[in-house]
Image (tube, rainbow, N blue to C red):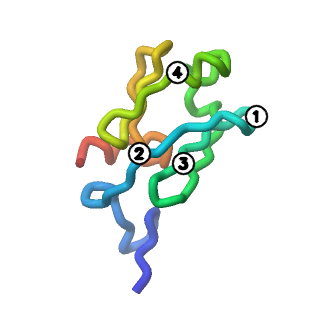
Amino acid sequence: MKVPLFGGKHSMTLKNTRISIEKLNFDLAGKISLKLEDGRVIIVPLKYFPDIQKLPVEKRKKYTIVDERTVLFSYSNNVYHLEDFMGLESKWRER
């Protein structure tokens, strides 16, 4: 049986799943791309992250990945979790 990552009766949370961010990319205009270590790529519009969106591209590239799932930007006071980019911001507290 296939279990979808999002939605559905048997949806899977990230609580017991090992998903790690490998790197971020800002090559697509108005978007942030997260390359995961398993090869998948998540692309999200920056409009959902106004603090990142207002940073110039060069400052967006100054980030640190912490604990494989948390992103800190040098020029932002916000902390972003993988779940934020996946639309599961309420789930990161369950980890």
Give the quadrant of residue 61.
top right
Give the alpha-carbon distance from disc 2 to disc 1, as whole Å.
22 Å
Which residue position holds label 2? 83
Disc number at residue 35? Answer: 3
Q: Secondary structure at mark 4?
A: loop
In the image, residue 51 sits, relative to residue 49, either above or below, namely above
Give the alpha-carbon distance from disc 1 to disc 4, as whole Å.
18 Å
On screen, residue 5 versus residue 33, left or right, reads left
How would you rate the neighbour count of disc 3 (Cα within 10 Å): few for under 14, some for 14-19, many for 20 or more? some
Q: Are marks 4 and 2 in contact (CB under 8 Å)?
A: no
Q: Position of residue 53 (x, y in %)?
A: 63, 23
Q: Earlier in the sequence, mark 3 or mark 1?
A: 1
The residue sitting at 34% across, 33% down in the picture is 66
Which residue position holds label 4? 62
In front: mark 3 or mark 2? Answer: 3
Q: Earlier in the sequence, mark 4 or mark 2?
A: 4
Q: Earlier in the sequence, mark 2 or mark 1?
A: 1
Q: Nearer the viewer, residue 61 or 79?
A: 61
Q: Secondary structure at mark 1?
A: loop
| Three-letter residue code for mark 3 | Lys
How would you rate the neighbour count of disc 2 (Cα within 10 Å): few for under 14, some for 14-19, many for 20 or more? some
| Three-letter residue code for mark 1 | Ala
Give the alpha-carbon distance from disc 3 to disc 1, as whole Å.
16 Å
| Three-letter residue code for mark 4 | Lys
Q: Are marks 1 and 4 in contact (CB under 8 Å)?
A: no
Disc number at residue 29? Answer: 1
Q: Nearer the viewer, residue 53 or 89?
A: 53
Q: Earlier in the sequence, mark 1 or mark 4?
A: 1
Q: Position of residue 55 (x, y in %)?
A: 61, 16
